[in-house]
Each structure stands twice: as structure tokens, then as C-alpha cells.
Image (cartoon, grey):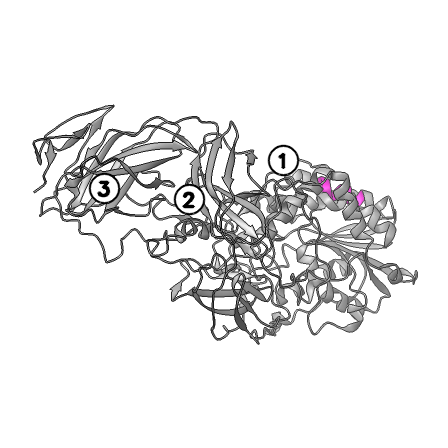
């Protein structure tokens, strides 16, 4: 019989729940309290220091792609019994670290990106807003904190209200008019192909809070975009001012420059200086109210963010003073001291940074103080109702008209859009199996099952989310999965290269629908590397992937996409780029926990990305070694085997190593000894170390839970240890097999008879 194996990927997988990337000023707004706080490092183009404009616009694309990836977390019910649902063995490994970071997306040439950005700044009507030349034309420049998300009032609205109260004649100008809108509901979309151009579009057509004055909506113009850095706007500002002339600028940028690694503090100050200089080239009389940047709550591994924020805020006043003239005054807006957000807490932000209703008033109040003190506009600062116990909480409705139905995606759930919801939490189970990780989230009012099995009955409920606020959960709805999704590809082979790999495969068979692409998932999983899962999509075999780190261990899976969505992933052999054929594993040891359970351990082999465990029944004439399975994502070089009937002493084991499809030979066989009663033997395979120490990770148990169906294995045995030294076995009174001959205890006539 084939032995039952404990899951042979790493024990105790610890993963980072990635929606915490709302960390910085411009990931999509999500309910951060559900997940740990950690981050993805986006590499700085050409190092720290200053960054040129063309490099900055390319860097912005990488930031936007990362934010898009982290804007949703799939809710995938994962069975705890992978033997009952073998299709879910691979899914159990990768589900907790989704969504993948799609690699190989080609950036447009800088000139093309700039052309797109310049075109977008001229794409909306703003000229009518500055026809009255007698008014003071104000351009508000910023990032997500300034643009806001649909349903926000925004601090722009609050300062507009205050400006109206002063009685001055003003107009708000700029190329954009809206907040960031949520995407429309849609079926699952395939990822971009390896080498395809990146989508550089962004949303500026979202609505405002229900209380917003219609007069504001008629002139809610601005130049603020989610993900924007001063390093980008310094190259765009002249064109914006030429198309939408202004007399005064409210400038609130800089956080993303430091937070998303565009530049260091000196480089960020240089970008602010260039932006002001370039604005003056269009209007030498421009007046500037320039804000410093707020702190955000602590992010594990990002101590530099707090120190960088402090240094920037300390040095900014001197820069502004040096640039200020009587013709073109430049004055500081002290956000840091007026906005209640720090390294330890952020009561004014819904995610540790972005403003909630009270925070919007605080930001606008800081600007009003500067306008009074330095520009002589107004007489008393904006009043914040939150200071006197007032409330500005947003009303968040319960999602209504929720429906679940069978679909080509398996199961689809829809509901009516809740205006002002940043996202929706989704809680799903299938056939009574709960998700083994946190509730998922979607940005629009639709959810589709991912990797469903035919006939599974899904049970789903949702709630609307607005930052740290949420509605009640809806009632549960159910539907039976009828997926029309493709099968996995066949005959996957992986060849390591010096800095990457080549993956080949055969198309799936059967009714696969119209295949759109294949997505290669790969993950540098080792606990101390702190890497997220990546992917690269191709139309057909082969997939040539470069840019991997030589010597690092990448686990591989392959997914087929058709017009309905993605099929169930299939495991490929793990690979070490830059390495060749691995050596044969040595020092195989077998410990018998009880009469039907053993633990195997061995010494690692050079250049091995993974190992294969083999077995045979030595009492079956002519028996040959058979493969049990691969051991990957395991740094202990161990594996446990269960249900070895009629007894462990009937079985010999061996291990081999592999690197992609490059295989070593098998180690010498070792026969399991019989187990005696009386001793309790601890399992040899301990838990994996914590993933990404200090990174704010969340523990997620692997599929299977480490115990076989039917209860925990008995561990009362004498735990006899078998050893091999080099290529020759050493017999120390215990049974060892060489070329089918058993020697040592429990051996009679060359056969292992047990007790």
C-alpha cells in the first residue's frame, strides 16, 4: 500500500497578509485593521539621493502596479484534509500568500509615459474655471491624501468651505475634478503577459460625500493623484499651469517620495525645490503654501520612514525660507503638528495615515492657519467639530440585494453597490470548510470563487468597508459550483539557468475552453528572505524567466487561464537558478514512532531545490522503489510517513534530490526498524522558523495540519535510529538494507521480520 504522508511542504508556514501595503500614502484604501502591518520594498531607481523626472515616472508605474496587486485579498476556502481533496494540495501552499506579484510587465518608454501623463492633465475641462481673472485661482497639488476616495468629503472640500466663509473671491482650478472611484464589477481578468506594456491609467472620476455642496462639485478641480510623488509632479507642473493658470498653489507632496523609495530626504527636498522653480517659470508671481508631511503608524521593518519623516520636516522650513521672495512668497503649512497621526497611533486616519472625517478637518485647518498668518486671508482658523465632541462619521449601508448563483467561474456573488465603501469583506466557506486564513476583500460589488471544485456548495456573506469602519454582515447566501475552468497543464519541466529558469509544459486535455494564457507562479519561500510570491504569464510553452536570484530556492506552480478564469494550479519541481545537477542526499535516518509510523531525516545535498522520498515493500518479491512524493519548502530535510501496514519493518526507504528536472540518484535504502512499546517519541520534523522575522507576519497553518485523517498518530515506540555514512551503510545492531539484504537487529536470513 502507498503510505500516508504528512504534508511535504514546510511545516507551520508563516505568511505576510499583503493588504497591509495600504501602509504608504497611496495603496488602495482597504480595511487595514484586518491584517498585519508590513510592506513590500519597491527598489529605488539608481539608488537614493535625487531622482530624475523620467526615472520617477517609470518608478511611479511600478508603485501603481504594486498597489493594484495589493488592493484585494482572495477569500479561498481551503480544506484542512488535503488527502480528501488532492487538488488542493498546491492551493494550500500558495493561497495564504496571494495575490502574486506579476513580473515581466514592460514599462513604456519614459517619453511615452510622460506623454500619457501630460495628456491626462489636459483631458478634463478646467479652463472655464479661470475665466474670471479678478478671482484668485488656486491649484491644489497632492497625492491620495488630497485626492481622496469615492465618498470622502476630502480636506479640499473643507478648505473650500472655509475660503468661502472668508469672503475672498477665489476659484479652484486644475485638470481633475473627482476622487478615486472603485472599479466596476467584472469577471476575473487574466494577468498581463510577460513583456506586455503596463497600464498607466488612473481614476479621477469618483464622487464626493453626500453632504458636499453643489457649488463645490461645480469647481472641485485639483491636481492630486493616488501614488503621486513630487519627483513626478516637478516635471508636469509647468504644463498643468499652462493649461490651467493659477495664482496660488497649495502643495502637499513628499510622503510617497520617501515612503515608496523614490529618493532620500535630500532628493525629496530637491524635487520640491524643482517643482516650485518650474511653477515659477510659468507664473513668476505664484504664491505657495507648502505642507510638510504627516507621520504614519509604525510599520515593522520601516524605521527609516519615521526618521525620514522627521528629517524632512526639520529641513523643509529652511528650504522654503530660502526660496521665498516678496514677488513669490513661499510659506510652510505645518501638517505634522496639526494632524493627529504618529508612529504609535493615528486617531485622525482610517488606516494609520489617510484622513478620516476628523482628519480632513485637521488638514484643512492647518492650511487655514498659514493662509491667515502668512497671506492675510481670513481671520480665524477653520473650526473642527471633532474638537468639541462632534461626529463626522460616514454612514455606511448594509449591502443589499445579495445574490449567489452558479456560474462558469464556479460561484458568483453580486450585491448592490454601497456608495462610499472603499472595499467589501467577503467571508466564504465551501461544503462547510472554513477559510484557513483571513477574510478576503474585493473592491467592487462582485465576488467569484477561485479554484472551485464541481459540486461544492459555497456559503458567502459580505460587508461594506470604509477604512476602519464597516457595516454589519449580510445574511449568508449559497450556490453550487459549476466551474467551466481549464485543467492544469501536463508534463511540466523546469530547467535552471544562470539567473532564471525555462519552464515547458504540454497543454491540458479535455474540455478546457478557449485557453487564454498560462501563469507561472514562483516563490522564494525561505523564511529569512521575506519575499512575496511572483508570477509570469505566457501564451504558450516555453516560459523563459530571467532576473531571479542565483542560489535561491523557488517553489513553482503552473496555472491555466481560459475565458472564464483560472484553473487549479499544478506543482512543478522547485528550482535553484545558477545551480546544476544536485548530489545524492546522505545520512538517511529512519525512526519508528509506532508499528505503522516512521520519521525520515537526511543531510541536505548540494544544489538541491527539493527531495523525493521513495519506498518499497522488501517482502514483496521483485519490488522496486516507488515515489511517495516531493519534499519542498522544508528546511529540516525530514518527512513523516503513516499507516505502514502490516508494519514499518516491511518497508525500505530512500531519498533523492532534484533541481528543476535535474535529478540525482537515490540514496542507499534504509529499512524501518520495528517499534517497541514504552517510549514516547517526538516527531523529527519540527516547525519551520517564523517567516520574515520582524516583518509583522501572520501565522497560517498549512493544509493537512500535519496529522493524518482519523486522529493523531501514536508516538509510543522505542525510536530505533538507522544511519548511513557516505555511500556505505554502517551496521550498528539495527536493521539496514543494502542491495535488498537486511543486516542487524530484526533481521533473519537477510529479511527484516520485526517483532
Look at the image and give the residue range highlighted in magenta.
270-277
Tag of residue 599: 3
For disc 2, the marked residue is: 693
Q: Residue 493's spot in the image, x, y percent?
A: 46, 36
* Distance from Cα at disc 1 to Cα at disc 3: 50 Å
Quadrant of the image occupied by residue 738: top left
Q: Is residue 605 above or below residue 356?
A: above
Q: Residue 208 or 300: which is nearer the viewer?
A: 208
For disc 1, the marked residue is: 48
Front of the two marks 2 and 3: 3
Q: Residue 383's spot in the image, x, y percent?
A: 69, 69
Q: Is residue 132 left or right of residue 500?
A: right
Which of the two labelled residues, at mark 2 and mark 1, occupies the earlier sequence position?
A: 1
Which of the two labelled residues, at mark 1 and mark 3, occupies the earlier sequence position?
A: 1
* Distance from Cα at disc 2 to Cα at disc 3: 28 Å
Per the picture, the main secondary structure of the magenta-coloured stretch is helix
Which of the two labelled residues, at mark 2 and mark 3, occupies the earlier sequence position?
A: 3
Element under label 1?
loop
The residue sitting at 42% across, 39% down in the picture is: 526
Q: Which quadrant holds the C terminus? A: top left
Q: Check whether the beta carbons of the residues at disc 2 and disc 3 lie within 8 A of each other.
A: no
Q: Residue 259's spot in the image, x, y percent?
A: 60, 46
Q: Is residue 507 above or below residue 513?
A: above
Q: Residue 616 or 224: which is nearer the viewer?
A: 616
How many marks the image carries: the answer is 3
Q: Is residue 167 above or below residue 453?
A: below
Q: Residue 223's spot in the image, x, y percent?
A: 76, 55
Amino acid at each position: 500500500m502507498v503510505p500516508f504522508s504528512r504534508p511535504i511542504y514546510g511545516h507551520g508556514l508563516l505568511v505576510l497578509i499583503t493588504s497591509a501595503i495600504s501602509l504608504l500614502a497611496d495603496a488602495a484604501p482597504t480595511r487595514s485593521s484586518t491584517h498585519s502591518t508590513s510592506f513590500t520594498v519597491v527598489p529605488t531607481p539608481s539608488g537614493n539621493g535625487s531622482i530624475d523626472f523620467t526615472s520617477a515616472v517609470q518608478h511611479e508605474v511600478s508603485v501603481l502596479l504594486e498597489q493594484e496587486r495589493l488592493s484585494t485579498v482572495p477569500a479561498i476556502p481551503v480544506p484542512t484534509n488535503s488527502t480528501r481533496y488532492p487538488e488542493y494540495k498546491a492551493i494550500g501552499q500558495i493561497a495564504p500568500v496571494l495575490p502574486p506579484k506579476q513580473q515581466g510587465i514592460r514599462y513604456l518608454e519614459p517619453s511615452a509615459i510622460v506623454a500619457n501623463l501630460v495628456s491626462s492633465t489636459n483631458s478634463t475641462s478646467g479652463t472655464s474655471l479661470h475665466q474670471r481673472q479678478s478671482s484668485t485661482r488656486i491649484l491644489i497639488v497632492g497625492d491620495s491624501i488630497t485626492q481622496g476616495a469615492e465618498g470622502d468629503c476630502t480636506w479640499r472640500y473643507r478648505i473650500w468651505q472655509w475660503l468661502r466663509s472668508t469672503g475672498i473671491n477665489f476659484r479652484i482650478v486644475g485638470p481633475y475634478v473627482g476622487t478615486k472611484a472603485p472599479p466596476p464589477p467584472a469577471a476575473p481578468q487574466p494577468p498581463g503577459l510577460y513583456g506586455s506594456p503596463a497600464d498607466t491609467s488612473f481614476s479621477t472620476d469618483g464622487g464626493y460625500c453626500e453632504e458636499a455642496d453643489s457649488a463645490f462639485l461645480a469647481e472641485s478641480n485639483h491636481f492630486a493623484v493616488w501614488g503621486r510623488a513630487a519627483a513626478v509632479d516637478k516635471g508636469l507642473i509647468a504644463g498643468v499651469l499652462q493649461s490651467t493658470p493659477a495664482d496660488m498653489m497649495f502643495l502637499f507632496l513628499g510622503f510617497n517620495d520617501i515612503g515608496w523609495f523614490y529618493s532620500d530626504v535630500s532628493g525629496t527636498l530637491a524635487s520640491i525645490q524643482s517643482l516650485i522653480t518650474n511653477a515659477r517659470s510659468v507664473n513668476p508671481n505664484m504664491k505657495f503654501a507648502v505642507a510638510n508631511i504627516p507621520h504614519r503608524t509604525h510599520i515593522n521593518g520601516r524605521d527609516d520612514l519615521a526618521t525620514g519623516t522627521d528629517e524632512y520636516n526639520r529641513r523643509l522650513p529652511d528650504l522654503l525660507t530660502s526660496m521665498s521672495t516678496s514677488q513669490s512668497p513661499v510659506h510652510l503649512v505645518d501638517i505634522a503638528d496639526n494632524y493627529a497621526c504618529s508612529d504609535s497611533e493615528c486617531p485622525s486616519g482610517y488606516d494609520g495615515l489617510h484622513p478620516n472625517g476628523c482628519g480632513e478637518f485637521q488638514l484643512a485647518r492647518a492650511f487655514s492657519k498659514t493662509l491667515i498668518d502668512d497671506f492675510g486671508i481670513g481671520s480665524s482658523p477653520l473650526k473642527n467639530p471633532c474638537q468639541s465632541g462632534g461626529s463626522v462619521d460616514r454612514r455606511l449601508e448594509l449591502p443589499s440585494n445579495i445574490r449567489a448563483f452558479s456560474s462558469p467561474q464556479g460561484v458568483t456573488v453580486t450585491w448592490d453597490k454601497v456608495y462610499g465603501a472603499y472595499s467589501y469583506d467577503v467571508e466564504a466557506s465551501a461544503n462547510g470548510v472554513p477559510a484557513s486564513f483571513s477574510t478576503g476583500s474585493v473592491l467592487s460589488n462582485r465576488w467569484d470563487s477561485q479554484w472551485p471544485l464541481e459540486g461544492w456548495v459555497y456559503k458567502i456573506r459580505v460587508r461594506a468597508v470604509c477604512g476602519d469602519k464597516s457595516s454589519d454582515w449580510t445574511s449568508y447566501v449559497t450556490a453550487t459550483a459549476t466551474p467551466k475552468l481549464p485543467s492544469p497543464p501536463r508534463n511540466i519541466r523546469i530547467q535552471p539557468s544562470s539567473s532564471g529558469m525555462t519552464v515547458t509544459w504540454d497543454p491540458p486535455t479535455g474540455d478546457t475552453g478557449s485557453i487564454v494564457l498560462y501563469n507561472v507562479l514562483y516563490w522564494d519561500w525561505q523564511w529569512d528572505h521575506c519575499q512575496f510570491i511572483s508570477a509570469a504569464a505566457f501564451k504558450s510553452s516555453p516560459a523563459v524567466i530571467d532576473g531571479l536570484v542565483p542560489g535561491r530556492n523557488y517553489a513553482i506552480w503552473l496555472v491555466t487561464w481560459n475565458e472564464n478564469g483560472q484553473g487549479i494550479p499544478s506543482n512543478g519541481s522547485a528550482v535553484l537558478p545558477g545551480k546544476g545537477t544536485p548530489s545524492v542526499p546522505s545520512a538517511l535516518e529512519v525512526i519508528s514512532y509506532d508499528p505503522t509510523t516512521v520519521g525520515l531525516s537526511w543531510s541536505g545535498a548540494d544544489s538541491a531545490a527539493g527531495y523525493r522520498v521513495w519506498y518499497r515493500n522488501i517482502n514483496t518479491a521483485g519490488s522496486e522503489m516507488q515515489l511517495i512524493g516531493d519534499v519542498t519548502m522544508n528546511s529540516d530535510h525530514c518527512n513523516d510517513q503513516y499507516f505502514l501496514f502490516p508494519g514499518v519493518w516491511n518497508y525500505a526507504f530512500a531519498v533523492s534530490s532534484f533541481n528543476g528536472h535535474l535529478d540525482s540518484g537515490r540514496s542507499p535504502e534504509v529499512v524501518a526498524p520495528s517499534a517497541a512499546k514504552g517510549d514516547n517519541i517526538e516527531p523529527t520534523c519540527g516547525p519551520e522558523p517564523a517567516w520574515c522575522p520582524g516583518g509583522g507576519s501572520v501565522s497560517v497553518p498549512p493544509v493537512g495540519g500535519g496529522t493524518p485523517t482519523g486522529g493523531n498518530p501514536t508516538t509510543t515506540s522505542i525510536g530505533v535510529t538507522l544511519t548511513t555514512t557516505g555511500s556505505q551503510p554502517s551496521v550498528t545492531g539495527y536493521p539496514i538494507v543494502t542491495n535488498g539484504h537486511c543486516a542487524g537487529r530484526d533481521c533473519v536470513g537477510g529479511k527484516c521480520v520485526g517483532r
